Image (cartoon, rainbow, N blue to C red):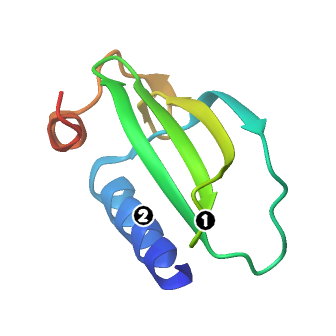
């Protein structure tokens, strides 16, 4: 899990270096349902709901091997150009299209 997460971070860093686009979180909400413990292995299911003006994703977190949802929530991100931090009013095609929008 840690290696996969690290790899994703590298890909986002490469995208930033190529385009100067950042995707800050502008809104998030989380409902904690069942407590998680240190060293629990987690599964995270993410559903993209929108990716035109902003990226909106719902997520569920479950403990690996269990069917119970431990947490669920929603996150919203926008695209900005660095260093001006100017908001773009659309998500770039190379991000939007793989998300199905």
Q: Residue at x 36, y 25 (%)?
A: 49
Q: Secondary structure under badge 2?
A: helix
Q: Which mark is residue 13?
A: 2
Q: Residue furthest front?
A: 67
Q: Is residue 99 rendered to the left or right of residue 73?
A: left
Which of the 4 quarters of the picture holds residue 41?
A: bottom right
x, y percentage for residue 66?
60, 65
Q: Is residue 43 above or below residue 59?
A: below
Whether 38 is drawn above or below 22: the answer is: below
- In the picture, measured across the screen, residue 7 lies left or right of residue 93, that is right
Dot 2: within a 10 Å radius of its alpha carbon, few (fewer than 14), some, or many (20 or more) residues? some
Q: Nearer the viewer, mark 2 or mark 1?
A: 1
Q: Is residue 73 left or right of residue 91?
A: right
| Mark 1 secondary-structure assignment | loop
- Per the rendering, the mark at residue 66 is 1
Looking at the image, tell me whether mark 2 or mark 1 is earlier in sequence order. 2
Quadrant housing the C terminus: top left
Q: Which residue is rendered at x = 52% and y = 56% of the image?
A: 44
Q: How many marks?
A: 2
* Disc number placed over residue 56 in the picture, else none: none
| Residue 75, quarter of the rendered image | top right
Residue 37 at x, y percent in the picture: 84, 70
Residue closer to the observer: 48 or 90: 48
CA distance separating discs 2 and 1:
33 Å
């Amino acid at each position: 899990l840690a290696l996969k997460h690290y790899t994703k971070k590298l890909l986002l860093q490469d995208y930033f270096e190529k385009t100067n686009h950042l995707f800050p979180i502008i809104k998030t909400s989380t409902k904690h349902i069942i407590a998680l413990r240190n060293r629990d292995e987690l599964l995270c299911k993410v559903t993209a709901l929108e990716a035109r003006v902003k990226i909106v994703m719902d997520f569920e977190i479950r403990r690996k091997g269990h069917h119970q949802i431990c947490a669920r929530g929603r996150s919203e991100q926008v695209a900005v150009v660095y260093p001006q931090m100017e908001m773009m009013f659309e998500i770039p095609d190379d991000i939007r299209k793989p998300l199905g929008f």
